[in-house]
Amino acid sequence: MPIATPEVYNEMLDRAKAGKFAYPAINVTSSQTLHAALRGFAEAESDGIVQISTGGAEFLGGQHSKDMVTGAVALAEFAHIVAEKYDVNVALHTDHCPKDKLDGYVRPLLGVSEERVKAGRNPLFQSHMWDGSAETLADNLSIAQELLERARAAKIILEVEITPTGGEEDGVSHEINDSLYTTVDDAVRTAEALGLGDKGRYLLAASFGNVHGVYKPGNVVLRPELLKELNEGVAAKYGKPAGSQPFDFVFHGGSGSSPEEILTALENGVVKMNIDTDTQYAFTRPVADHMFRNYDGVLKVDGEVGDKKTYDPRTWGKLAEASMSARVLEACRNLRSTGTRIK
């Protein structure tokens, strides 16, 4: 199937919300990691989300120019072609973009999709993320309003992060402390500024103790039940029925989360969970194993010629792709998206 149309992407998110499952959102940095993600989704019979961070886009732009927009556009165009060979729907998303990178990343990419839509085509990306967690909430939401208006016109969904996620990702870092918990007041202010779908659809990355990076279960205090409080607070404010879930939540910093924490998050409105650290390791681990096991073959040691079949990138690249796709398959099982593809 091709990359999801705006209509299909909306249907994907609606189905996840109703079915209390979430889509793994897999960060990719190359054509090979893209194929690994697509393969994992296909084997799980799950639709999914592939995303490119600012650092990933810079890497994709090549080390000569390191142009983020070039890198993101190139991989997105590639994805539009190769995704047709996988029997699942996949949405393209850009990950964390702070204020100082908006003009070099999200805004130009919105412009690309705006031109495509004016020409009667679908947008290049299906959603973009604005990470204003380092700003005051007032400034964060002011910028979000501008971006949401442009995104809506381009048939794109906006993701907003209103309060910090701990740890560090692509140069955006926050201390691990009590500020990592979104309040009901934060959620109400967000709804007041961005609406509840009437001004354009958005995904909300609320904080419930999330931390980027690698942590063993128990090292980070997650409170996914907080998401229920946020939904209930906003529902009461806007006269929504009891038990309704006004927000489509995103789970950031999920590495090391326990199965129970993940399931609680799903029950409380999470429809997208970002996965990067775990898939990076899954991709790299078999490569390291191959290099250690075949040291004399991948290196021309002591004047020898090595073994071309051993150092051929295709040899160890296939192992990396298979390992990463298996981790994506596991993520689909954990998030209950296995077998839920739109046929």
Image (cartoon, rainbow, N blue to C red):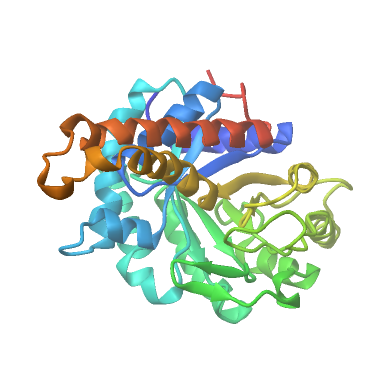
Residue 160 against residue 338 in the figure, above or below: below
Q: Position of residue 224 (x, y in %)?
A: 78, 55
Write down the quadrant of residue 94 in the picture.
Answer: bottom left
User: From this viewpoint, is residue 126 visible?
Assistant: no
| Nearer to the camera, 215 or 196 | 215
Pick whichever, 34 or 213, lies toward us: 213
Q: Residue furthest right?
A: 242
Left or right: where 170 falls relative to 77: right
Q: Position of residue 304 (x, y in %)?
A: 12, 42
Q: Foreground: 257 or 98? A: 257
The relative height of residue 136 versus residue 33 in the rendered view (above or below) is below
Q: Is residue 115 left or right of residue 24?
A: left
| Residue at x 69%, y 55% (from the top left corner) | 216
Relative side of 72 to 94, left or right: left
Quarter-of-image position of residue 319: top left
Q: Position of residue 334 (x, y in %)?
A: 67, 36
Locate residue 19, reporting x and y percent. Answer: 72, 31
